[in-house]
Amino acid sequence: MDGASAPPTGATGVSPPKLVFPTTRLMGYDKPREDLVRAYGVWQRRQVSHEQKGWYEMMQHLTLERGYDLDIIASNPEWMYYFYTEENDIPEGCAWSYVCDVKAFHEQRERL
């Protein structure tokens, strides 16, 4: 396959993972999805130093801008990691935490 007909890739030449469409929601929520993304962003920012907070604010903004919710993030961790790092230059460690902590956030909310 020549370069002209190759599928598009991210800035580093990495192809995006396939998006997963589960048949049922992974989590039930008691608030509007956008509000939960904002609450998740606040929860994440409480766990990092001032110098990292901007990255978490950016991921929250990107998530809301694209209409994603916590269920999409939890269902598609590889795709969301790619979206944050390859398409939006978020540092890998910040993106990994943002993507992987959704279930812990949900479990903590259920205990309250």
Image (spheres, rainbow, N blue to C red):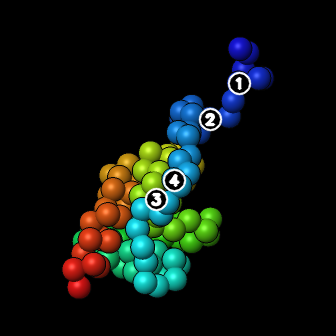
Please determine whether, in this image, residue 16 is positioned above or below residue 21. Answer: above
Dot 2: what SS?
loop
Which residue type does callout 4 highlight?
A: Pro
Dot 3: what SS?
helix
- Location of residue 52 in the rendering, given as x and y in whole percent from the top left corner: 33, 66
CB within 8 Å, label 3 to label 2:
no
Question: Which mark's residue is nearer the viewer, 3 or 4?
Answer: 4
- Location of residue 18 in the rendering, given as x and y in whole percent from the top left corner: 56, 40
Dot 1: what SS?
loop
Residue position for label 4: 22
What number is the disc on residue 9?
2
Q: Quadrant of the N terminus?
A: top right
Question: Which mark's residue is nearer the viewer, 4 or 1?
Answer: 4
Residue at 53% across, 78% down: 34
Q: Earlier in the sequence, mark 3 or mark 4?
A: 4
Query: Quarter of the image holding residue 2?
Result: top right
The answer to whether any part of residue 20 appears in the image is yes
Q: Quadrant of the C terminus?
A: bottom left
CB within 8 Å, label 2 to label 4:
no
- Mark 1 is surrounded, within 10 Å at the Cα level, by few (under 14), some (14 to 19) or many (20 or more) other residues, namely few
Residue position for label 3: 73
Residue at 37% across, 61% down: 98
CB within 8 Å, label 1 to label 2:
yes
CB within 8 Å, label 4 to label 1:
no
Please determine whether, in this image, residue 29 is positioned above or below residue 89. Answer: below
Which residue type does callout 2 highlight?
A: Thr
